[in-house]
Image (tube, rainbow, N blue to C red):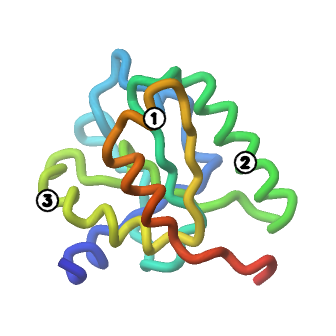
Amino acid sequence: LLPLAEASFRAVRFDKLRESDLSPRGLAPGPAAGAAPLGEPCELGECDAFVSHAWSDPAGAKWASLRAWAERFEAEEGRWPKVWVDRVCIDQANIEASLPCLPIFLAGCHTLVILAGPSWSSRLWCVLGKSSTPRPRPASR
């Protein structure tokens, strides 16, 4: 499983994301057919944050929270964070193959960002993800 996770791990720089990447309404998962995916190949351990959210929670509130976190990160680090977000970092044509890799993807990120809305705690994967929080990120690099 580790070789598959290493080969398929992706991240996206925050400034390339859109609010719609956190919303299930009116959008097919992932990029449009034929479009290049937003997520780019990334080494495990080189992603700044794994973003955990529930699809059924309001996208606007999730986006505002993620944006605030990313702006603080940018102010401290001098660059936008690289984040793992399911819609743009999982191969949408082969989701089932990626699911067993989720714990490895989580461990490959420096921190866990939880966008906890009304239904987040009722989603089993979200709760499991919180219990598998990655190692703390050093204060400076």
Residue appearing at x 32%, y 39% in the figure:
30
Give SS at disc 2: helix
Choose between 61 and 32: the one closer to the eye: 61
Q: Residues within 10 Å of mark 2 (few under 14, many from 20)?
A: few
- Disc 2/disc 1 C-alpha distance (Å): 18 Å
Amino acid found under the numbered disc labelled 2: Trp
Q: Which mark is residue 120?
A: 1
Residue farthest to the top, as pictured: 26
Q: Which residue is mark 2?
A: 69
What residue appears at the point 17 percent right and 77 percent down from the top-left corner? 1
Q: Disc 1 vs disc 3: which is toward the camera?
A: 1
67 sits to left or right of 99: right
Q: Secondary structure at mark 3?
A: helix
Please report whichever mark, 2 or 1, sits nearer to the chain's N-terminal start. Answer: 2
Q: Is residue 108 left or right of residue 104?
A: right
At x 33%, y 66%, the residue is 103
Along the line of sight, the residue nearer the viewer: 137 or 83: 137
Q: Is residue 107 above or below residue 31?
A: below
Q: Quadrant of the C terminus?
A: bottom right
Q: Which mark is residue 47?
A: none
Mark earlier in primary sequence (1, 3): 3
Three-letter amino acid code at the position of disc 3: Ala
Q: Is residue 113 left or right of residue 7?
A: right
Quadrant of the image occupied by residue 100: bottom left
Which residue is the site of mark 3? 97
- x, y percent for residue 135: 56, 77
- For this rendering, which residue is in front, 140 or 136? 136
Give the percent coordinates (x, y) of residue 85.
45, 49
> Mark 3 Cα within 10 Å, few/some/many (few <14, many 20+)?
some
